[in-house]
Amino acid sequence: MSIRSKIILLVVVAVLVASGLVGGLAIKFSLKTLRGEILKRGEALTLALGSALREPLVVQDTVKVKEVIDSYGEMKGVILAAALSPDGDVLAVSPMERLSPELRYYLVKNINEEENPEGEEILYFKFPTPLVSKGVSYDSVYVVHKTILGGTGGHVYLALPTAFATVVKTQHKLGFLVGGAGLAMAVLVAILAAAIGVGLTRRILYLADVAERMSLGELDLPVEVKGSDELARLAEALERMRVSLKAAIERLKKRTM
C-alpha cells in the first residue's frame, strides 16, 4: 500500500470517527428534546388539572372532583387520571379499571416520600404484569404528579403512555452503539496512525543512514527494499545508485593500475 493510500485510509477512518461522534451527540440531543416534550405535556396537563381541582379538593366537592377526573381520564394520550387526598386516599380515578393495586400502592408511597411538595415531577412506573385495558397492553407508564396547596389540598396524578419509552430505549441503545463504535474507531485510528508513523519513521531513518554511509564511500552493503510504496522506490533508486557507484569506482581503480 502506498503512503498516499495509507494517508487516505487514515483520513477516511477519522471522518467515520467524527461522524460517529456527531451521531452520538445528535442522539443525545434528541433524547433531551424528547424528554423535554414529555415534561412539557405533563406539566401542561397537570397544571390545568390542578387548577381545575384546586377549589373542589379544598371544599371536598367529591362530585366535581370526579367530573374533572373523568374528563381528563378520557383525554387522548392519558391512560389514567387520579385525585388523592392529603393522606393518600383515592378520591377519584378514571378509568377505574386501570388503577392496579401495584400502581395505587406506588402513588400512595410517592406521597409519603415526596421531597418537593411544591413542584411537578415525572415518575416512571413499571407494572409487575402488563396492564390490559380495552385491548391495549401497558407494561409501564409515566406518572406526572402535582400537589395542591403543597399537598395540604391533595394530589393529582396523570399516567401517560410510554410509547416514548420504547423510542428512548432504542435511542439509548443506538447511542451506546454509535458511541462504542466511535470509541473503537478512534482507538483504531490511533493504532493505525502509530503503526504507520513508526513504520515510516523507521524506514526513513534507515534510508537516511544508507545515504550517509554511501556518502562516506561504504558501498558494499546492499540496500534493503521492502514493500512497493514510494519509500520502496526510493530504496530501489539508492540501491541502483550504490551498484553504479561501486562499479564506477572499480573501473577507475582498474584504469589507474
Image: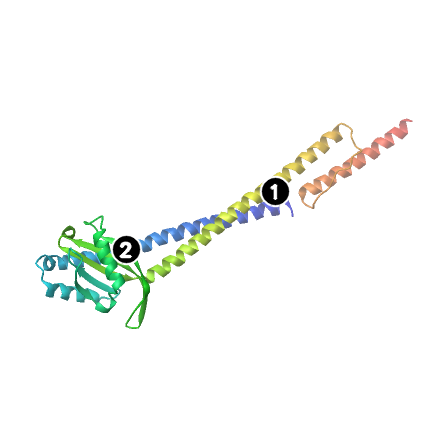
Residue appearing at x 57%, y 44% in the figure: 191
Label 1 Cα crowd, 10 Å radius (few <14 / some 14-19 / many 20+)? some
The kind of residue tagged 1 is Ile
Q: Earlier in the sequence, mark 1 or mark 2?
A: 2
Q: Position of residue 245 (x, y in %)?
A: 80, 33
In-front residue for pair 206/5: 206
The residue furthest left is 59
- Looking at the image, can residue 95 be seen? no
SS label for mark 2: strand
Which labelled disc corresponds to residue 196? 1
- Looking at the image, can residue 156 be seen? yes
In-front residue for pair 142/194: 142
Q: Position of residue 190 (x, y in %)?
A: 54, 43
Instruction: Name the image quarter holding the C terminus.
Output: top right
Q: Look at the image and name its color scheme.
A: rainbow
Measured along the vertical axis of the image, is residue 247 above or below residue 87?
above
In-front residue for pair 72/153: 153
Q: Which residue is mark 2?
A: 123
The kind of residue tagged 2 is Leu
